Image: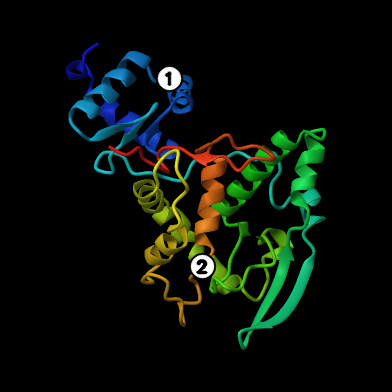
Amino acid sequence: MSAVSTPVFADQQTFDFLARHGCTVSEESKDALANAGFLEPYTNAIIADALSRGVAKQEGAYVVLDASICTIELPDIQTTLAVGNPEIRAIAPYIRDEYEYAGETTVNEGCFLTDAVDVFTDRASGDLDRGTADYLDFLAAGIISGELRFFSPNPLATPLGFQSFAGDCADVPNMPIVTPSHDFIASHFGQYVRAIGETSECDGPASGSALSIAAELQGLSGDRFEDPDPTFNAWLFFEYELITMAAGWHEGLSGSERGAPRPPLCHYPN
């Protein structure tokens, strides 16, 4: 089947499907396409055509589609436990913590997760790798839904942990600040991934610009963090990183290994 005989609408349907896979063709995304009913000959023809037109790039074993034909969207992450589950609520006590640093007073108040990874490891019969994978899915799904956040407008003030905004944990003092920033996670995820991919070489160290990239997307320049918009989250880069981990975009990730980014989070030198 030649690329010429491939219907135009099939191209866009394929690209739209791959949007939630980082606009990246991998063994996993090809399997997902096949399971969704996309015929392999058509898929192969579409990808080959994109490569020939220069709107896709071969990155090792992966093909990354250009932003001109594919907009990266948040991945579809499934979790075995919802944030509002009683089992999770039991390990998310209401806490009020106040401390001073560099002359500023920081207050953390709300429901913060404690030892959540242990819950998932226990549910996985002690299998640390599976428990860690399930925990990452839980965190990513919660961040995407807005029911979990790792939020602080100050990069020097690390949050107590992941804050739950599910159920009775939603009525907290910082909710009016955190909630408006949630839409930003979806609207700028693709730009963040593309920027990280452009600045990180595969088989090399991960980009050290993640914090700055996330800050610039939120309207701050470089490393300036003075008097930011209160909805600015200095830890957005960390939330994005967890989402990409849960999506499977890190090779060798396990309960004991951090793994290494793979396309679309990196590129190979020309």
The residue labelled by disc 1 is 37
> Residue 144 versus residue 262: which sits nearer the camera?
262
Mark 1 belongs to which amino acid?
Gly
In the image, residue 95 above or below residue 242: below
Q: CA distance from mark 1 to mark 2?
A: 41 Å
The residue labelled by disc 2 is 234
Label 1, residues with CA under 10 Å away: few <14, some 14-19, many ≥20:
few
Which one is in front in this view, the residue at disc 1 or the one at disc 2? 2
Looking at the image, is mark 1 or mark 2 earlier in the sequence?
Answer: 1
Mark 2 belongs to which amino acid?
Ala
| Numbered mark located on residue 220 in the image | none
Residue at 61 percent of width and 51 percent of height: 142
> Residue 87 versus residue 29: which sits nearer the camera?
29
57 sits left or right of 78 in the view: left
Residue 215, position as x, y percentages in the image = 43, 66
Residue 42 quadrant: top left
> Residue 78 versus residue 150: which sits nearer the camera?
150
Label 1 secondary element:
loop
Label 2, residues with CA under 10 Å away: few <14, some 14-19, many ≥20:
many
In the image, residue 25 above or below residue 178: above
Residue 79, position as x, y percentages in the image = 65, 40
> Residue 125 versus residue 155: which sits nearer the camera?
155
Residue at 68 percent of width and 58 percent of height: 166
Instruction: Name, please, the residue furthest toward the top.
Output: 1
115 sits left or right of 220 in the view: right
Residue 209 in view, yes or no? yes
